[in-house]
Image (cartoon, rainbow, N blue to C red):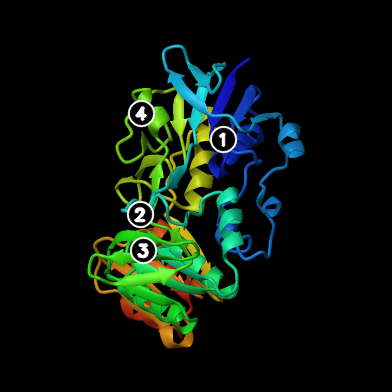
């Protein structure tokens, strides 16, 4: 009997396993997870679960019974230690081994640690998994002051959660603005003002140099002399792909596990999907590593389809979202080189979209409380449709009329 081994039981691993069964893969499917939980959805951990509106079990994709019902051999609390490519074998923690006909690596990523003098003894929290979420939730008590290091999506969502739970919050960002890696200055400005309106202090353009900790408080001293005091620190300064298993097996892992548009590594029996991959994105025309919910799901689906003989290139337009307070932020594509941004809507009214055009075509966009714009924009980008900037900016003209090539 053929056997697929999936290393990593997060979103990507779960969708790979589910899709194998959906497309009638008849062999054995083994899903290995390092955590004690069934596969679960991560986005709620920085939103509803963190503020106590939902419990961790609400994030599970499949229960243990559902996994068994699909014929998925789920093995929690188990780490893969080595891949023997010649023998097509995975060695597990404890010494046992598994043979595979196809191997799918969905090992994800881990938080980048804040390493400055004093960090070892400091009350630093990270947010990646369920256990991280529960530990941080216990700290977000009314009256505490939370220092968030990193003004990306995770950091800002934590700041919003802290305010909802009655904490003071201050965001410390190295770049000169929040969301510098994922959005343009206009979106950064709106989000900054929104957080300040909710009582969050945002300090940009400073670099933490050291941390001093006491029994119930701590403070960060920055290189420019800025001092930020609080009761706990949350570090949201990016992630590191968990590519060591692949690297030790001799696979290319520069910037993540290298895969082609069919999710294959240079070893035809090994695929990879999700946050850990450095993949060819046909829409961007280059390699990219994405840390998005959509990428983890759809790239894993693509990998399973290839194994089932349905070879289709993975060509999704990058998409991500964030919920902060009553604001929904969505982003399509990756703004790189573009003409002057085109604004649709009015930021002062709390709903607008910002478009990045290149040679008259939408290459990326960001939407604040403008869900309908996103759906049409996805089609504009996918269809490589030329648009007139003045029509795009005119809110009196329905977005769907732009789908006809101008």
Provide residue 246's location: percent of width, then percent of height. Answer: 40, 28
| CA–CA distance in space, label 4 to label 3 | 33 Å
Residue name at image x 58 percent, y 34 percent: 33
Residue in the foreground of this view, choosing between 17 and 249: 249
Work out whether 160 lies above or below 274.
below
Tags 3 and 2 touching, CB below 8 Å: no
Q: Residue 118 carries which label?
A: 2
Mark with earlier residue (3, 2):
2
Give the residue pinned by disc 4: 247
- The quarter of the image holding the C terminus is bottom left
Q: Is mark 1 on a helix, strand or loop?
A: loop
Tags 4 and 3 touching, CB below 8 Å: no
Residue name at image x 69 percent, y 61 percent: 54
Give the residue pinned by disc 3: 364
Q: Residue 34 carries which label?
A: 1
Q: What element carries label 4?
A: helix
| CA–CA distance in space, label 4 to label 1 | 19 Å
| CA–CA distance in space, label 1 to label 2 | 29 Å
221 relative position to 374: left or right: left
Disc 3 or disc 1, which is closer to the eye? 1
Disc 4 or disc 3, which is closer to the eye? 4
Disc 1 or disc 2, which is closer to the eye? 2
């Amino acid at each position: 009997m053929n056997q697929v081994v999936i290393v990593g039981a997060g979103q990507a691993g779960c969708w790979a396993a589910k899709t194998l069964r959906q497309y009638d893969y008849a062999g054995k499917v083994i899903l290995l997870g390092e955590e004690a939980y069934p596969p679960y959805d991560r986005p709620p951990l920085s939103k509803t679960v963190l503020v106590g509106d939902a419990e961790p079990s609400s994030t599970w994709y499949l229960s243990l019974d559902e996994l068994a019902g699909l014929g998925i051999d789920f093995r929690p609390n188990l780490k893969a230690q080595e891949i023997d490519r010649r023998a097509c074998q995975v060695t597990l923690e404890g010494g046992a081994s598994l043979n595979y006909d196809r191997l799918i690596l969905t090992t994800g990523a881990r938080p980048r640690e804040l390493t400055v003098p004093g960090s070892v003894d400091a009350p630093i929290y990270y947010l990646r998994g369920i256990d991280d979420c529960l530990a941080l939730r216990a700290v977000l008590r009314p009256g505490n002051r939370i220092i968030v290091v990193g003004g990306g999506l995770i950091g800002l969502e934590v700041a919003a959660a802290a305010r909802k739970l009655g904490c003071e919050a201050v965001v410390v960002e190295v770049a000169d603005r929040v969301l510098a890696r994922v959005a343009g200055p206009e979106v950064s400005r709106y989000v900054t003002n929104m957080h300040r309106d909710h009582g969050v202090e945002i300090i940009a353009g400073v670099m933490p140099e050291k941390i001093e900790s006491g029994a119930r408080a701590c403070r960060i001293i920055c290189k420019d002399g800025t001092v930020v005091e609080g009761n706990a620190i949350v570090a949201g300064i990016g992630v590191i792909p968990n590519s060591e298993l692949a690297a030790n097996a001799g696979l290319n892992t520069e910037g993540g596990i290298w895969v082609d548009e069919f999710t294959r590594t240079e070893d035809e029996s090994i695929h990879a999907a999700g946050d850990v991959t450095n993949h060819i994105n046909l829409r961007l025309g280059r390699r990219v590593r994405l840390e998005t919910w959509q990428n983890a799901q759809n790239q894993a689906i693509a990998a399973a389809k290839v194994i089932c003989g349905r070879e289709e290139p993975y060509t999704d337009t990058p998409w991500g979202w964030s919920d902060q307070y009553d604001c929904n932020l969505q982003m399509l594509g990756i703004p790189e080189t573009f003409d002057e941004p085109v604004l649709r809507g009015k930021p002062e009214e709390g709903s607008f979209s910002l478009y990045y055009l290149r040679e008259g075509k939408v290459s990326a966009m960001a939407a604040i409380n403008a869900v309908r714009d996103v759906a049409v924009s996805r089609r504009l980008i996918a269809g490589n449709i030329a648009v007139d900037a003045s029509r795009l900016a005119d809110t009196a003209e329905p977005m769907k009329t732009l789908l006809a090539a101008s």
